[in-house]
Image: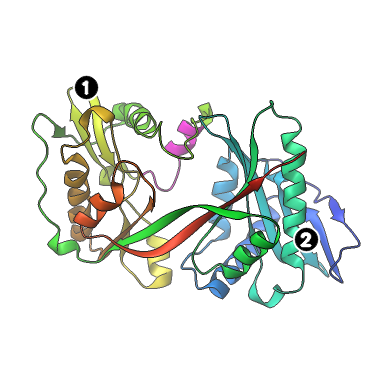
Amino acid sequence: MNVSDGTLLIASAPVDGVVLRLFRGAADFLAMANVANASFEADGVQARRTAEDLERDYAAFTRCDPLQDCVVAEIDGEMVAYGRCWRVTQADGLTMHAHLGFVPGSWRARGVGRMLQTWMEQRHRTVAEHLPPGQHVHHAYVQQGEDARAKLLVACGFRPVRYFFEMLQTRLHSVPDFPMPEGLELRPVLPEHYRAIWDAHYAAFADHWGMAAPLPRDYDTWLESWVFQPARWQVAWDGDEVAGQVRTFINADANRHFSRARGFTEYISVGRRWRGRGLARALIARSLRLLAEEGMSESALEVDSENETGAKRVYADCGFEVIKRGTVYRKALEF
């Protein structure tokens, strides 16, 4: 990542003393982490960022140019908020111009969030003008508890369009024993399997809401991501084809910070030819037992509330219960 000079965007802002500038690169990461964590704490959201997390993530972005898509709010040289934009074009041609923003509780209700929102929506319009014709929308995901952000989005013309549930399983030592379907087998994940596992997951999700085809660099980014923990994965094969998978992972840093022992049963997919045979339940059950063996006491996942394959019912059968709801907000992008 190159280093920006942090070009000043607004010198005389609607909020006294606050200026907006562009992201300056690695020098901003520690302050950004502090701002994000203060925002999470104000909303009661169990999430945490470190400077190292941000440095890793920002280097891996494929649909965002942080030097142009990230905005920082400062007062007297101190970062008080920031926001970031990116865009994704779905398989159906719809381009989602997504954004997020973090404002600590002490800086809310002063107009800082509105400043960020105004800048990010204008950035979306600028980008959209240079993209191929098609449908474009502003897009934001709000976690339960982020009430101030939801209120701001509604005030800016956004409306909820989809809900996602966070589910938690807290009985890892009493997971039902769902058998593997006949003719399928589990195999240890080897490096020569990585590409087939990646491709099978995207093929299984091709018809899901919000799906976008991966970019060429996304595969290499995945191989280097912190959630890439293949020793924990459960992958079922039918001959030389991947029938289904659960790509389990653990965030040890978050567990230490929040004094919990949580794993994640995520990236769950079953190819069309193998659906309706109990494969997802069998893989999930094995994932949960593995987490128990590693000393975890719970596992979390997220699911689309309108998933057409009945995923929420499958997860409930495996002992997961809904604990939170996230909301996707959108509004038409006009330019």
Figure quadrant of the N terminus: top right
Residue depicted at 69% across the width and 73% down the height? 108
As for residue 220 lying within the magenta part, the answer is: yes
Answer left or right for 104 relative to 122: left
Residue at numbered disc 2: 115
Q: Would you say residue 24 is visible in this rendering?
A: no
- Considering every residue shown, the one lying at the far top of the view is 240
In terms of depth relative to the viewer, which is nearer, 117 or 220? 117
As for residue 75 lying within the magenta part, the answer is: no
Please tell me how crowded label 1 is: few (under 14), some (14-19), or many (20+) other residues with Cα within 10 Å: few
Q: Distance between the residues labelled 2 and 1?
A: 53 Å
Q: Is residue 225 above or below residue 75?
A: above
Residue 70, image x, y percentages: 70, 50
Q: Identify the amino acid type marked 1.
A: Asp
- Mark nearest the camera among 2 and 1 is 2
Q: Is residue 266 above or below residue 79?
A: above
In terms of depth relative to the viewer, which is nearer, 285 or 219? 285
Q: In this view, does 1 lie above or below 240?
A: below
Please tell me how crowded label 2 is: few (under 14), some (14-19), or many (20+) other residues with Cα within 10 Å: some
- Considering every residue shown, the one lying at the far right of the view is 12
Figure quadrant of the C terminus: top right
Element under label 1? loop
Element under label 2? helix
Residue 240, numbered label: 1
Q: In this view, does 256 lie above or below 204?
A: below
Magenta stretch in the rendered image: 218-228
Residue 183, numbered label: none
